[in-house]
Amino acid sequence: MKAPRLKDVDLSLTISTTAYEKKLAKLQRTLMQIQQAYLLSGRSGVIVFEGWDAAGKGGAIRRLSTALDPRSFKVWPIGAPRNYYAQRHFLLRFMERLPPSGAITVFDRSWYGRVLVERVEELTPPERWRAGYREINDFERMITDDGVRLVKLFFHISPEEQLQRFEQRLRDPLKRWKLTYEDFRNRNRWGDYEEAIDEMFAKTSTSASPWTVVPANSKKYARITALEAIVKAFRRDVELKPPVVHQSVLSEARDHLDLDDELIASLSGRTE
């Protein structure tokens, strides 16, 4: 399959507020159905969020989180590894955070730090981050072969849009904490990061775990695009209809609740 490239992404794409709200509500309802289906079937899902600083990953994750029961949904924010993990293979901390059966996990940044920030900032020797492509592909093949649904999203914005969002964060007391010195410093390496991102796509976008590049100059458009990609991957070959209620539950419900026979029959799956 052909890997995406940043230069091919149309950052002018937008969506109206009315269309956004309508699509968001529909997608969130489907996500609720997917989570229930996963709980019943024992399936599990992993969503990787990568992208430029201030590209809107957090806003998309919040819209995803709103739809899901936190008891079987977990978001892992990933920063620099603490000493314990820094002394071990870089994939270990991600293996330990994979979801159990029936659950969905989000990685807000991920194992791709190996071939992005560790590469560009020269935190890892070249022979090790180059080996990271093969190790990542093997890791993703291992988890998808085990039945995990994997979605990989990269949020792409222009340098100009990023600078505007930095200013918005600086002016907003509730968002000011998000802005760091490194955010500005990383802009000086934009070209290096573009090169690393495109090579990451070329080497790790596979038929089993492709990359979806999300045009994110419009936050609303980015959220819908991201949720659509998640829904498309997670609902494939999954029955979303509610399960038939067990007869023991219906028997107790009949004794304790004022239910008509037609409703009892429909809940038990009988239509005659």
Image (cartoon, rainbow, N blue to C red):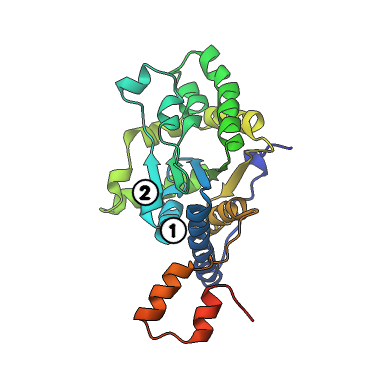
Q: Quadrant of residue 75?
A: top left
Q: Residue at x 33, y 42 (%)?
A: 179
Q: SS of the residue at dot 2? A: helix
The residue that disc 1 covers is: 63
Give the vertical position of 92 relative to 41 (above or below). above
Q: Position of residue 45 (x, y in %)?
A: 52, 45
- Vertical position of residue 227 compared to residue 121: above or below: below
Taking the image as drawn, is residue 33 in sight? yes
Q: Is residue 135 above or below residue 60?
A: above
Of label 1 and label 2, which has the lower sequence position?
1
Along the line of sight, the residue nearer the viewer: 99 or 101: 101
Callout 1 crowding tier (Cα within 10 Å): few <14, some 14–19, many ≥20 = some
> In percent of the image, x 67 and y 35: which residue is there?
206
Spot occupied by residue 91 in the image (x, y as percentages of width and height): 46, 25
One can see residue 197 in this view: no
For this orientation, the residue located farthest to the left is 173
Residue drawn at point x = 60 percent, y = 59 percent: 239
Q: Nearer the viewer, mark 1 or mark 2?
A: 1
Crowdedness of circle 2 by 10 Å Cα count: few (<14), some, many (20+)? few
- Rounded to the nearest angstrom, the CA distance separating label 1 from label 2 is 23 Å
Q: Nearer the viewer, residue 120 or 250?
A: 250
Residue at numbered disc 2: 167
Residue 8 lies left or right of residue 168; in this view the side is right
Q: At which x and y percent is residue 111? A: 48, 30
Observer-nearest of 234 and 136: 234
Q: Amino acid at mark 1?
A: Arg
Q: In which quadrant will I find the C terminus?
A: bottom right
Q: How many marks?
A: 2
Which residue type does callout 2 highlight? Glu
Q: Quadrant of residue 67?
A: bottom left
